[in-house]
Image (tube, helix red, strand yellow):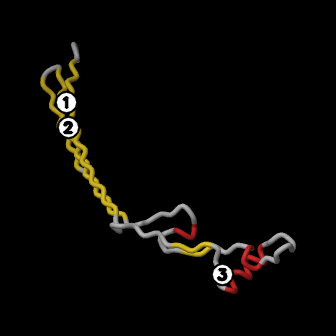
């Protein structure tokens, strides 16, 4: 970011000029998933269904933990972003000029 201002007084005039230059470069390499198991590093989701008895009581967290111990995930995934990085470039330029005139000092 670059900014410059110039002020000049001449009689009853006060002149001011300026410029602002903003250059932004963003390089991002962060794939984002909707679920925790499809995030960038990947992951697993364990549910009660793999260790639940058919016709038995409703599943609970112990059934999900048993699924984890047995290595039976309900969902598994990894999000791959191709190309693997996102690049954004932006340039913004602004200029201004002002004349403040006073009848009497």
Determine whether 30 is above or below 88 in the image: below
Q: Are marks 2 and 1 in contact (CB under 8 Å)?
A: yes
Q: Nearer the viewer, residue 20 or 62?
A: 62
**Numbered label attached to residue 7:** none
Q: Nearer the viewer, residue 90 or 49?
A: 49
Spot occupied by residue 42 in the image (x, y as percentages of width and height): 51, 74
Q: Which residue is mark 3?
A: 72
Q: Nearer the viewer, mark 3 or mark 1?
A: 3
Spot occupied by residue 81 in the image (x, y as percentages of width and height): 39, 67
Q: Earlier in the sequence, mark 3 or mark 1?
A: 3
Badge 3 density bin: few <14, some 14–19, many ≥20, Cα 10 Å? some
| Horizontal relation, residue 70 to residue 1: left or right | right
Determine whether 16 is above or below 63 in the image: above
Determine whether 7 is above or below 4 in the image: above
| Quadrant in which residue 44 is drawn | bottom right
Q: Earlier in the sequence, mark 3 or mark 2?
A: 2
Q: What is the CA distance from the residue labelled 2 to the residue labelled 1?
A: 7 Å
Q: What is the CA distance from the residue labelled 3 to the residue labelled 1?
A: 69 Å
Q: Residue at x 17, y 37 (%)?
A: 6
| Quadrant in which residue 20 is drawn | top left
Q: Are marks 3 and 2 in contact (CB under 8 Å)?
A: no
Q: Residue at x 15, y 31 (%)?
A: 8
| Horizontal relation, residue 102 to residue 39: left or right | left
Q: What is the CA distance from the residue labelled 3 to the residue labelled 2?
A: 65 Å
Q: Residue furthest bottom?
A: 70
Q: Are marks 3 and 1 in contact (CB under 8 Å)?
A: no
Q: Residue furthest left?
A: 10
Q: Residue at x 44, y 65 (%)?
A: 31
Badge 2 density bin: few <14, some 14–19, many ≥20, Cα 10 Å? some
Q: Which residue is mark 1?
A: 97
Label 1 SS = strand
Q: Which residue is mark 2?
A: 18
């Amino acid at each position: 970011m670059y900014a410059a201002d110039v002020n000049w007084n001449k009689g009853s005039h006060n002149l001011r000029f300026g410029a602002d230059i903003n250059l932004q470069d963003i390089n991002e390499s962060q794939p984002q998933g909707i679920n925790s198991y499809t995030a960038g590093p990947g992951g697993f989701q364990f549910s009660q269904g793999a260790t639940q008895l058919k016709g038995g009581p409703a599943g609970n967290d112990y059934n999900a933990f048993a699924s984890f111990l047995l290595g039976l995930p309900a969902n598994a995934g990894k999000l791959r972003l191709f190309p693997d990085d996102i690049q954004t470039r932006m340039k913004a330029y602004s200029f201004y000029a002002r004349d403040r005139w006073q009848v009497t000092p």
